[in-house]
């Protein structure tokens, strides 16, 4: 116990001497902190941006439901390399196909199924006001698959869907354009020359990146729109299938393929004229991209950290030279090498930690400013990033201070007093 107390007293003395040295040379200390502060800020800012963007994109993709399958004429993985000759042979899913799949698919394999058709530009009127919107016609099942945030009202139900009643859930921008400062629920708009009652309003998506934009859309039951476009093959359509369990996705895809081929009367040996897409691959793409950005962040921030480390090392060498006589006196009075080394290492680490703390203060200011600037995009400083930055700060201090500390510890007391 006495040895432990003595060690703590020695450590505290070294810490006080280090603080005293830093206070004595405020300008020099400030300049040496600058490199570390910028380095820690750069690395932390990039990591915070990457983590926040990754969280935002994954959260946006989750709105489509986990492992949701999309039956489509497009291959989502190769959207940038579409073979138009092959695309012409592909067929859009139709409503009767959706009904066939729902009736014949093993009910234990899926939770919900939806048929969607999108009419890209439709005029919507309210009195003399008119806006053009994207009209999305879904079955009521879509609200069990996708995650929508309601600001007011409700979604349409199974009865309204099957009867094709004229009801709608509208996007935030549509509500603002047609009913500024009013609650649209219970009011009417005109689509296809028919009056439609608004039963719900979606929250306005203010996100920086809109993966599933709903602001300028209105959602109506498919069986209402079908009256105006019977047997349509012109507009985009898809069938969404939400698996009952992620483990059942391979079996679900296999059964879907068999049933679609049967519905489309495709003979054995003929290629599929459809694709079954799982958009969860996008999460892997996002995560891989974020890893690449993180590596780039370390490379860019690493240069600043390297400059900071050299700055601290340089300042420590100057400190050793200035305090040569003091070191000689300490050693003449019985101070051991370890005590001298510890004193200078503590000073170096303290410099680096203060620099890192300043970098983090800059980061928090930037996060607050960024959160206000990018409404709907949440910037979050994670505990992991704080731990990484703190660890890097300490490591820089140790690496930058080791050589100067060893140089100080090697000084002979008589030579040091004479040189000082």
Image: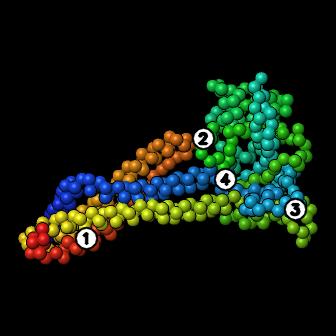
- Few, some or many residues within 10 Å of mark 3 (<14, 14–19, 20+): few
The answer to which of marks 4 and 1 sits earlier in the sequence is 4
- Tell me how far mark 1 sits from mark 3, CA to CA: 70 Å
Residue at which label 1 appears: 404
The answer to which of marks 2 and 4 sits earlier in the sequence is 4
Residue at which label 3 appears: 85
Let me know if residue 6 appears in the view: no
- Among all residues in the image, which is located at the extreme left? 333
Residue 119's x, y, as percent? Answer: 81, 42
Residue at which label 4 appears: 65
Residue 330's x, y, as percent? Answer: 11, 69
Quick one: 359 or 188, which is closer to the camera? 359
Q: Secondary structure at mark 3?
A: helix
- Tell me how far mark 4 sits from mark 1, CA to CA: 58 Å
From the image, state whether disc 2 or disc 4 is nearer to you. Answer: 2
Indicate the quadrant where residue 386 lies. Answer: bottom left
Residue at which label 2 appears: 206
Q: Secondary structure at mark 4?
A: loop
Q: Residue at x 32, y 69 (%)?
A: 399
From the image, state whether disc 2 or disc 3 is nearer to you. Answer: 3
Q: Residue at x 15, y 62 (%)?
A: 13
């Amino acid at each position: 116990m006495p040895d432990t107390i003595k060690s703590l007293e020695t450590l505290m003395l070294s810490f006080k001497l280090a603080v005293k040295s830093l206070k004595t040379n405020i300008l020099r200390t400030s300049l040496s902190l600058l490199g570390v502060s910028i380095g820690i800020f750069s690395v932390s800012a990039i990591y915070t941006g990457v983590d926040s963007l990754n969280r935002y994109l994954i959260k946006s993709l989750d709105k489509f439901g986990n492992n949701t399958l999309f039956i489509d004429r497009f291959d989502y993985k190769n959207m940038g390399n579409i073979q138009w000759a092959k695309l012409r042979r592909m067929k859009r899913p139709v409503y009767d196909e959706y009904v066939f799949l729902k009736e014949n698919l093993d009910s234990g394999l899926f939770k919900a199924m939806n048929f969607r058709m999108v009419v890209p530009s439709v005029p919507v009127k309210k009195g003399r006001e008119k806006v053009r919107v994207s009209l999305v016609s879904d079955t009521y099942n879509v609200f069990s698959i996708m995650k929508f945030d309601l600001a007011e009202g409700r979604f349409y139900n199974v009865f309204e869907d099957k009867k094709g009643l004229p009801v709608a859930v509208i996007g935030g921008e549509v509500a603002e354009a047609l009913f500024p400062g009013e609650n649209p629920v219970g009011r009417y708009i005109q689509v296809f020359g028919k009056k439609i009652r608004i039963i719900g309003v979606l929250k306005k998506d203010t996100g920086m990146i809109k993966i599933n934009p709903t602001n300028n859309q209105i959602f109506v039951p498919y069986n209402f729109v079908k009256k105006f476009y019977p047997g349509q093959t012109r507009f985009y359509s898809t069938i969404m299938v939400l698996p009952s369990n992620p483990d059942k996705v391979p079996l679900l895809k296999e059964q879907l393929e068999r049933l679609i081929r049967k519905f489309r009367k495709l003979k054995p040996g003929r290629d599929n004229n459809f694709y079954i897409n799982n958009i969860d691959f996008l999460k892997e793409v996002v995560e891989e991209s974020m890893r690449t950005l993180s590596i780039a962040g370390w490379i860019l921030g690493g240069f600043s950290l390297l400059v900071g480390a050299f700055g601290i090392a340089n300042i420590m060498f100057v400190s050793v030279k200035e305090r040569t006589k003091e070191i000689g006196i300490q050693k003449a009075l019985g101070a051991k090498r370890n005590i001298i080394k510890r004193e200078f290492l503590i000073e170096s680490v303290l410099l680096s930690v203060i620099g890192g703390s300043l970098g983090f203060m800059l980061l928090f200011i930037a996060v607050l400013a960024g959160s206000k600037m990018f409404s709907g995009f949440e910037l979050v400083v994670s505990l992991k990033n704080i731990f990484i930055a703190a660890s890097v700060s300490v490591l820089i201090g140790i690496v930058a201070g080791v050589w100067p500390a060893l140089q100080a510890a090697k000084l002979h007391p008589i030579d040091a007093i004479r040189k000082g």
